[in-house]
Amino acid sequence: MTDAFHIDVPHTDATLAVIALSGEFDLATAPAVRARALELIAAGHPHLVADLTGVTFCDSSGLNALIGIWRCAKEADGSLTLAAIPERLGRLLSVTGMDALLPSCPSADAVLAARQGNRATA
């Protein structure tokens, strides 16, 4: 039995959006994730945080979707940060060398707190 897949956007601000994924991130669901992320970038949120807290499985299709989103964000002068990376996906990122290109954080809340801290000191 597969886990139902959900895409939520629990936070947006001026240029940042959090896209929260839950369930199996695979061949069947990766296109929807990529499409939703590109919609957010086009809507003026080029800095994305992919909250992976609820991801129960991720295959190479999910990894390819993340790489594609990262490239599109970069082209829009944005970024992609991964939050709460599941262990198996962390190993996949490490083996492929993508962990060196995709910054990560323990949680989406940590990214948002750091962003608010940067605004307070600017």
Image (cartoon, rainbow, N blue to C red):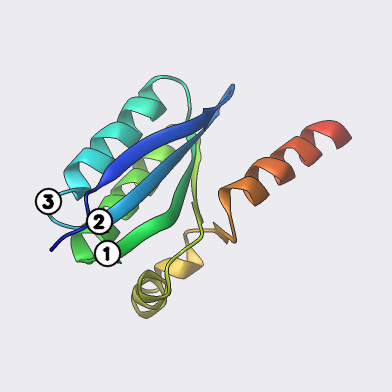
In the figure, is residue 11 to the left or right of 8?
A: right
* Residue 122 in sight here: no
Label 1 sits on a secondary structure element that is strand
Place residue 31 in its image quadrant.
Answer: top left
Residue 48 at x, y percent in the picture: 48, 39
Q: Residue at x 50, y 37 (%)?
A: 78
Q: Residue at x 87, y 36 (%)?
A: 121
Q: Which mark, residue 58?
A: 1
Q: Report which residue position mark 2 lands on.
A: 25
In the figure, is residue 36 to the left or right of 105?
A: left
Q: Earlier in the sequence, mark 3 or mark 1?
A: 3
Asked if the residue at tag 2 contacts the one at tag 3, i.e. Cβ–Cβ closer than 8 Å, the answer is: no
Residue 49 at x, y percent in the picture: 50, 44
Residue 116 at x, y percent in the picture: 75, 36
Residue 83 at x, y percent in the picture: 52, 55
Asked if the residue at tag 1 contacts the one at tag 2, i.e. Cβ–Cβ closer than 8 Å, the answer is: yes
Q: Which mark, residue 84?
A: none
Inspect the image, locate mark 3, and give the three-letter code of the amino acid beneath it.
Answer: Ala
Inspect the image, locate mark 1, and give the three-letter code of the amino acid beneath it.
Answer: Cys
Inspect the image, locate mark 2, and give the three-letter code of the amino acid beneath it.
Answer: Phe
Most foreground residue, 21 or 13: 21
Q: Quadrant of the C terminus?
A: top right
Q: Residue at x 25, y 56 (%)?
A: 25
Q: Which mark, residue 28?
A: 3
Residue 85 sits above or below residue 49 on the image = below
Q: Quadrant of the N terminus?
A: bottom left
Place residue 33 in its image quadrant.
Answer: top left
* Residue 81 in sight here: yes
Distance CA(mark 3)–CA(mark 1): 11 Å
Label 2 Cα crowd, 10 Å radius (few <14 / some 14-19 / many 20+): many
Q: Earlier in the sequence, mark 2 or mark 1?
A: 2
